[in-house]
Image: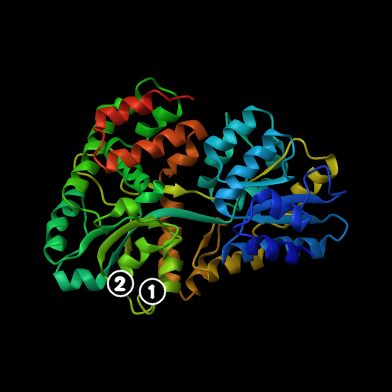
Amino acid sequence: MALSRRTLLGLAAGVPVSVALAGCGSSGPGKSGGAATYWYLNGQPQEGVRAGAVDAYNKAHPDGRINDTTFQNDAYKTKIKTAIGAGQAPTIIWGWGGGTLRTYAQAGQVEDLTSWFDEHSEVKKSLFPSSFGAATVDGKIYAMPCETVQPIILYYNKKVFDRVGAEPPKSWDDIMALVPRFNAKGIAPFALGGQSRWTNMMWLEFLFDRIGGPELFQAVIEGEKNAWSHPDALTALAKVQDLVKADGFIKGFSSITADSNADQALLYTGKAAMMLHGAWSYGIQQADGGDFVSSGGLGYMNFPPVEGGKGDPSDTVGNPAQYLSISSKASAEQKKIAKDFFATGVLQDQEVKKWIDNGSVPIKLGTEKLLAASKSADFLQFTYDVASKAKVFGQSWDQALSPTAAETLLDNIVKLFQLSISPKQFAANLNAVIGK
């Protein structure tokens, strides 16, 4: 029954969410008897892993089931906020942690799990320590870290580099020096799906870290007045515009979407030399790029340092994990099922294996042998090392900030990359929404 509901929602991509839900018999927290409800994102291969974990749990717990429902990304973001605000959230809330979780926690809409983790210390000790930052609000834990770690990685096409006789960049100056060399050969230095906005954001995340250190953005998180106007912030904003002005990105990048994977195709077809993207990009290029990955054409590295910068070159940014919260409006029985799922159903051996088979690194510690046995062993070990050894793993800004501030950030990043506003104008616009 659960499988048929997932299938129907997957087919209903163009149907309004309310209609799709009605047609699939999905239920909110008060309409599912004793069962817990769980909403999460669809889309393969991730959906299959999530569904498999629920199926395995239900098979082992016939008297305490979880009824799951899947959504497309944008539909989910809208639906979950509406449901939580109306007191009709699912028992288990899938999310990205950070600023959105903070708004839920401060409104009393999700359970405080701090004492539960104290009682289940073995669960906490089995996960990447860095995954708990985005689950924590004012010193209390409000979400269970789950799934995979997704640092942002600098990818490059080895074959294109060989053709030009170039070496991967070891510094920001190297990046800027490579731009005219690739342009002279008719190759875009960097692929970018700029219409998607968050893809542009990744550049600023790394430049802020490498130039000013993690404290630079932390000042924004902590609501420090005029934090965006810090000299290091203005330097980072100016450097990304220097790259745009030098034709560092593919022509027409503002009209390319990341959802279409057109930016990925530019890299594996050799039309672009490099691309800054998440760890999930590896699996896409492996699936869509023919023999590009298997033939050794894909290179990858952490973002290089900026000369004179304060940041540690081991730092990374991205998604430290994904997160599961429990609705405070759920019944006692539903909460009990959810917590049991956290303890015995999340990141069990079979789920861990499936994530690794899909080219992802689960946030579970001690998986080195499984990673080493994978066909993607080198990349997975690289990702594991970046995530586990980073002194600071900065969360993606659009998740770290409140929904209001994140939307202002994304809108202004587009303008910054289009050169329609200056660094100082960008900083002023963002300073206006600090703490909102």
SS for callout 2:
loop
Task: Tell me which amino acid carries mark 1.
Answer: Gly
- Where is 242 relative to 297, above or below? above
Q: Position of residue 130 (x, y in %)?
A: 50, 46
Residue visible at 35% across and 42% down in the picture: 205
SS for callout 1:
loop
Task: Tell me which amino acid carries mark 2.
Answer: Thr
Q: For residue 208, say whether it is visible.
A: no
Residue count near mark 1 (Cα–Cα under 10 Å), binned few <14, some 14–19, many ≥20 = some
Residue placed most toward the observer, 356 or 369: 356
Residue count near mark 2 (Cα–Cα under 10 Å), binned few <14, some 14–19, many ≥20 = some
Q: Position of residue 295 (x, y in %)?
A: 34, 79
Label pair 2/1, CB-CB below 8 angstroms = yes
Residue placed most toward the observer, 392 or 226: 226
Q: Which residue is mark 1?
A: 289
Disc number placed over residue 55 in the picture, else none: none
Q: Which residue is mark 2?
A: 269
Q: Position of residue 377 (x, y in %)?
A: 45, 71
* Left or right for 35, reference 239: right
Q: How is the image coloured?
A: rainbow
Residue visible at 50% across and 63% down in the picture: 360
- Where is 317 relative to 48, above or below? above
Instruction: Give the spatial CA distance, label 2 vs label 1.
Output: 8 Å
Q: Position of residue 119 (x, y in %)?
A: 73, 42
**Which numbered disc, 2 or 1, marks the residue that appears first in the sequence?**
2
* Left or right for 207, reference 430: left
